Image: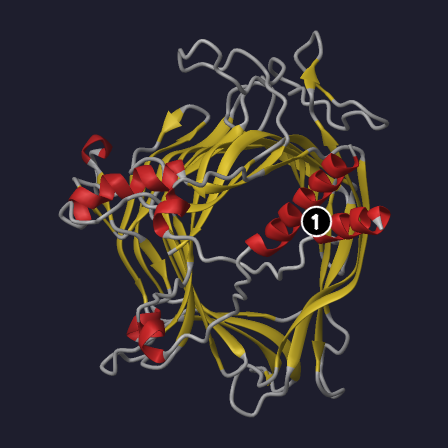
Amino acid sequence: MKKLLVIATILMMVPCSAFALEMLTEDVMDQVTGQAGVSIAVDDVVIYQNITSLSYTDGDGVFTGDAAASVGIANLKMMVNINAITSLDASGLPVSPGQSAIFGDYVDPAYATFSFLNADTDADGLYDAFEARPIKIDVGNCATLTAGLTNNNATLYGGLLPSTNVAGVVIGLPTVEIHQSALEFDVVLTQTGSANANTGGTFGTISIGEQTIAILGGTLEIAPH
Amino acid sequence: MNAMRQLIIAAMTIAALFISWAGTPVTAELCQLNDAALDGIEGQAGISVAVSEASLYHHLDGFRYEGTDGGYLSLEGITIYDGGNGPTTYNVGVVDTNGDGLIEPLTLDAFTVADAANPIFGKSLVRLAAPDWLQEKVYGIEAVKIAGYETNLPHEIGALVIGPIHLPSYELYVGGHSDGLDFELSATLGIDQVRLTTNTAGDALAFTGIYLNEAFEGAPETPATWVGQGEFRVGDIFAGTPATFDLGSTTLADGSVAAVMAMELPMAGSLRMEKVTLNGVDFGPVAIDGIQVHALEVVFVP
């Protein structure tokens, strides 16, 4: 009997109520602060991209009575490597950890090595250090958009805006290198009908050599209006 | 002892019952908003984008355009930077670059012209505007080469430096007509220098202080007095004369039918250059004011 009573007691401890969402009052919500935002590090990313064709079609031609034509590119292939820049070496050149090293050499043939400093540690307006940065995505106050609207409030709105705070997505740009292999493609004009003087015509071939982009940071703010 | 134990168990049982029944069994559910409530909600259309100290280096081994006959134009060793030893930097919506007292971000909107008196009433457009765009950007090209179709042997004409390029403000409208594109591009542009160095002795052809605006104040012969006003415009959508882009099979002047890419490029504005120098000889300023191109058809026939 006692054992049954104990078991019954334990079972009674299990909540049997149906809990549902409760509407919070404005006062309660004012006290709520949340954590928002993520940091994303990108390194040793290798992407192979193959675009068989990409075209734009004009269905009604240039002048009245013309047939349709399309312009596009074909057989575009490339390899893209993305590597995080996490430090500078003794020569001030970027370094990436992991399996893949930096692709670019960043040395101008005629002048001194480029500067990859991106942080002002002594607040003198000059960059004096390198700071490795991931991609940061936050939702909240957009400082730059807010500063602009605050400036414009007096000029454009007579100072009558109830608030100049702008909320949106704030994206911190990472320190990262993006390398793209050399690529080549034809620019092709395709027409409707075979009785054309330039059937199968192409505007020529575009060749783009290896590309290297090194991003050293910055902030992007996106907000609706 | 047994009684105490029974008393404790009973007390726990009662307490358990109380706890299990203590929660308020509220069932919340989504409520349908009525029209009056919906009327009070404002929708957002379009986005604003601000950029602060975005900095990057960009290097291309080369860019080449080759015709079907083998002739080509090649730009080798292209570096995009600040002209010194730093990266290109972008600041958008951070400072007032167009001098109107406002600090405005880049905006992207889609809309339909609702004014019945407007020549393009009912037309839908996408608008990209950047009234305050600040950049320090230089293109350094180590070698510019041209190869003729006869021999395909390249001839190097020199090294090219373009910049710093300043683009204080620009605006782009894009719409459609049937299956073609209508667009209007307006911008203020300044390029400190375009310099083609032709040999190792440093001889060069240079265009210094290049400006594109709607109009200029100041005497053309006195660059120090120049003040640019407004934006140089290609196409005027709201006047009913947009720039256009079309593709099609059409009949050429010689009666043959060919596939073509055709553009109409009406434009208006002014172009001035502070000076043109060749091997150190200064030819003075250049001013082309009041440009009004009512119709300019460009047809590409492969």
> Tag 1, which chain?
A
Q: How many marks?
A: 1
To which quarter of the image does residue A88 belong? Answer: top right
Residue in front for this viewpoint, B24 or B89: B24
How does the figure colour the protein chain or chains? secondary structure
Q: Residue furthest bottom?
A: A65
Quadrant that contains the C terminus of chain A: bottom left
Residue at x-position 68% and y-position 17%: A87
Q: Position of residue B276 (x, y in %)?
A: 38, 34
Measured as percent of width and height from the top left, residue A42 is found at 72, 35
Locate residue A191, reporting x and y percent. 70, 80
Height in image: B25 above or below B10?
Answer: below
Residue extending farthest left: A158
Q: Identify the residue at horizontal 36%, vertical 36% (top origin).
A: B94
Give the residue at x 54% y 66%: B27
Residue at mark 1:
A13
Q: Position of residue B245 (x, y in %)?
A: 51, 71
For mark 1, give the secondary structure.
helix
In screen coordinates, is B96 left or right of B13? left
Residue A141, by quadrant, is top left
Residue in the foreground of this view, choosing between A180 and B268: A180
For the point 25% across and 51% down, which residue is it?
A: B230
Residue type at mark 1 is Met
Q: Is residue B73 visible?
A: yes
Q: Residues within 10 Å of mark 1 (few under 14, many from 20)?
A: some
